[in-house]
Amino acid sequence: MSDNTGRVTGSPLVKRGLAEMLKGGVIMDVVNPEQARIAENAGATAVMALERVPSDIRRDGGVSRMSDPEMIQGIQAAVSIPVMAKARIGHFAEAQILQSLDVDYIDESEVLTPADEAHHIDKWAFTVPFVCGATNLGEALRRISEGACLIRSKGEAGTGNVVEAVRHLRSIMGDIRKIGQADSAELFDWAKQLQAPLPLVQEIADTGELPVPMFCAGGIATPADASLVMQLGAQAIFVGSGIFKSDEPEKMAAAIVESATHFRDPAILVKVSTGLGDAMKGLEIATLETKLAERGW
Amino acid sequence: MVTPTVGVLALQGAFAAHAAILDRLGVTTIEVRTEQQLASVDALVIPGGESTTMSMLLERSGLLEPLRARVAGGLAVFGTCAGLILLASEIRDGRHDQHALGALDMTVTRNAYGRQIDSFESDLDIVGFDTPFHAVFIRAPVVERVGESVEVLARVGERPVLCRQGAITVASFHPELSDDDRIHRRWLADAGL
């Protein structure tokens, strides 16, 4: 979109630009203005406004939808950092409403109940940028081809268990490294195997990285978890239940923020990990009735 | 002569994009997260990001006072977006506990262009450049006022967006996201590097 001043809004560079600004930081799930202020005070770079954190969604069951606009506006009024919100997979009407609310990023999220079992939102049609989850590189590239300008590895939200986040990150980063070694003929097969557009595969081969920033979500519950996923290649992290389901959310939030900055410095991690009280209890993946990460196509 | 080192403050934000441009220009670059790293640099880039987050992390990482002292001592600094906010002398619409380093005589208002939906890219005419610079503004701060010691190098409408005071350059946009290294090169030259 371009106005008569020559300004262009909603371009891929402008959309990706905000993700660039969030690197090295922590985006926190919050369900009300009070939690949003706690997150901002702790040093969050952005908040994700949603009705229930994933562990409560998991506990309560039922259909999980976009948040009440009033609740999102309350959070926008409470903090000065960017406010993101979630739309159901494929639910472009929810996304249109969120864009009208001037949210800073929309998360087309598997944490909510999918609205479409075949199609994701055409994200090119929006001025507001989108983040989408991915469990593997093919899924990430399909989301990018639909217009996502930030990818987060999915992990398994609401579990406080980092194992799935590690699995997804390793899968994505490992395939990026392998594509970097592939010859030009092999790239055609990579595109076929990944069910992803060839030009995006070729771009990875040329640059050695995903065409958009990649963050990590789903199961991060401690400063050490944050350090682990950052060392594995995540450029920033989303923390959902891990903060407000811990014993002392203020301390845990601040500690995870510091660990995202100093993720390679174990001496600082000792200091920030000390005296935090209990992290969220956490769940074994094998005991889950619903794997949220399996939603998305 | 020892090769000069340019630090990029890497507490949070677009530090890697700045480092990539400096690397391309053949400059020795390090990421700065600790007081020891700060002490080792000859010039510093403060990148875009969330200025509130960076301000808190400066304090918690023990960098705030050492940085204030180095800036007061004439350190060459290039601040973009959040970096501009941190280097200003007065911040409006910031948090009550947000730190202003006061490197330039300048009043800024955070996020004054609006939310992300109002972020934009635009060609800018910059003093001393033959051709326009393609600039990206992300939830950008607005420079409300500059002192007489501050040279305005570019404006959007009436508002200064690129300013210089000696070896300190600040931009309310993101030269690190454009494929154009002219502003970085000019700052390095101003810094004598």
Image (tube, helix red, strand yellow):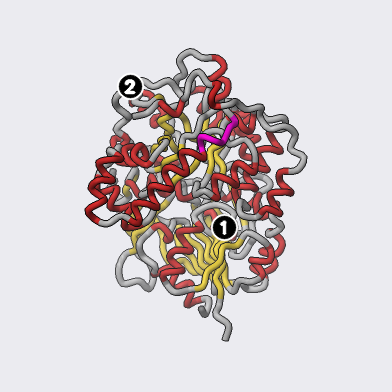
Percent position of residue B65, x then y: 71, 61
Q: Name the residue under label 1.
A: B10
Q: Nearer the viewer, residue B162 or A208?
A: A208
Instruction: Report whether residue B38 is seen.
Output: yes
A52 lies above or below B148: above
At label 2, which amino acid type do we have?
Asp
Q: Residue at x 68, y 59 (%)?
A: B63
Q: In which quarter of the image is the N terminus of chain B?
A: bottom right
At label 1, which amino acid type do we have?
Ala
Q: Say if the magenta span includes residue A162.
A: yes
When asked about the image quadrant of residue A97, the answer is: top left
Q: Name the residue under label 2.
A: A116
Q: Say which element carries label 1.
A: loop
Q: Residue at x 47, y 42 (%)?
A: A169
Q: Say if the magenta span includes residue A12.
A: no
Magenta residues? A160-165
